[in-house]
Every structure is written in C-alpha cells, then in structure tokens.
Amino acid sequence: MTKYQEFLKDLELLNIELIHINSDKSKELRETQEGLRIEYQLQYMGEPQINTVIGLIRYQLKIEINLFYVSKPEEIKDLISKMVLGYLIDFKSSNIENFQVMYKDPEIKEFFTKGQIVKTLWPFIRQLHIDLSNRHNLQVPPLPWIK
C-alpha cells in the first residue's frame, strides 16, 4: 500500500457545501470567440479545521473565475464576467491522529489539497459555472479539466 493509499483509507467524504456565490456580468459576448479566455484561481482559506473529538476535517475554499477577451498584440484583458464561489468540503476520519501525522508530510498534503480535493470539487464548480453563465445569457466553453 502506498503512503497515499494509507492516508486515504481512513477518510470519508461527508459533505460539499456551496457557502458563497457572487456572479457579475459586465459585457456581452462578441460574435466570435477568438481571444476569449477563462482564468480561474482556487485558494484555500487557511488550514483545515479539525475536530479531533468527532474526527471531522473541514476545508474552506474560494474560487474566482474570470471570462474575458484578450486583444492582440498588447494583451489587454476586456472582462466579460466574474464569478466568486465559496465552498466547504468536509471529511470524516476514523483515525484522526494518523491524519494529523501524515498530513504534515508535504507530499501528502500537496497530493490531497492540490489533487484529491480539487478533483473532487471540480465537477461541482464546472456545472455551476455553466449554470451561472446561462443565467447571464452567456454561452461559454466549459472550464478545462484539472490535470
């Protein structure tokens, strides 16, 4: 068993909760999608909250998604829409002490926070991005896959 498998074996996903949503449209899309770009930034809001009594591990994340046109050659960004989302994602650990010890390993922490959690949350973010864009009457390409 790899150290990643060992780390994950005691964890169970409990909840994914949208806690904040803000979506603004500043312009209409042009007839062409040439120069249309999507940028996103995902940020953890501090370290996870850990309740050792019940084995709960809670992460809070903020995701900002910007849709804009880039004009050449000067690379000027013309903002179309901006979305800011906040999520809580909760895990239950049957061995919280093991979680706390293994989470100190930088490789495990990176694997879990930049890989496992993001890939778990990403389908929710992609769908909400499409839904909010449709409500703004914006037909946008889907967010890219997380690789």
Image: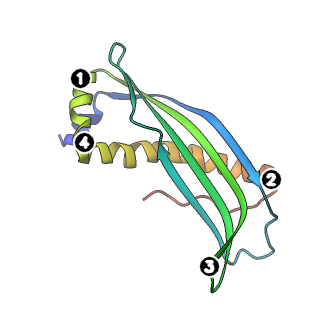
Residue 28 position, x and y percent, is 82, 64
Q: Earlier in the sequence, mark 3 or mark 2?
A: 3
User: Does 139 appear above or below 15?
Assistant: below
Give the residue type at disc 3: Glu
Quadrant the N terminus occupies: top left
Q: Are marks 1 and 4 in contact (CB under 8 Å)?
A: no
Real-space CA distance between mark 2 and mark 1, rounded to the nearest whole angstrom? 46 Å
Q: Residue at x 66, y 46 (%)?
A: 128
Residue that carries the numbered disc 4 in the rendered image: 4
CA distance for labels 3 and 4:
41 Å
Left or right position of 30 against 54 = right
> What amino acid is labelled 4 in the image?
Tyr
Say whether marks 4 and 2 touch (CB < 8 Å): no
Which-is-in-front pick, marks 4 and 2?
Answer: 2
**In the rendered image, which quarter contains the C terminus?**
bottom left
Q: Amino acid at mark 1?
A: Glu
Q: Nearer the viewer, mark 3 or mark 2?
A: 3
Mark toward the start of the polypeptide (2 vs 1):
1
Q: Which residue is mark 2?
A: 136
Mark 3 or mark 4: name the one nearer the start of the chain: 4
Residue 84's spot in the image, x, y percent?
Answer: 63, 47
Tell whether label 3 touches label 1 (CB within 8 Å).
no
Q: Earlier in the sequence, mark 4 or mark 2?
A: 4
Q: Say what secondary structure mark 4 lies in.
A: helix
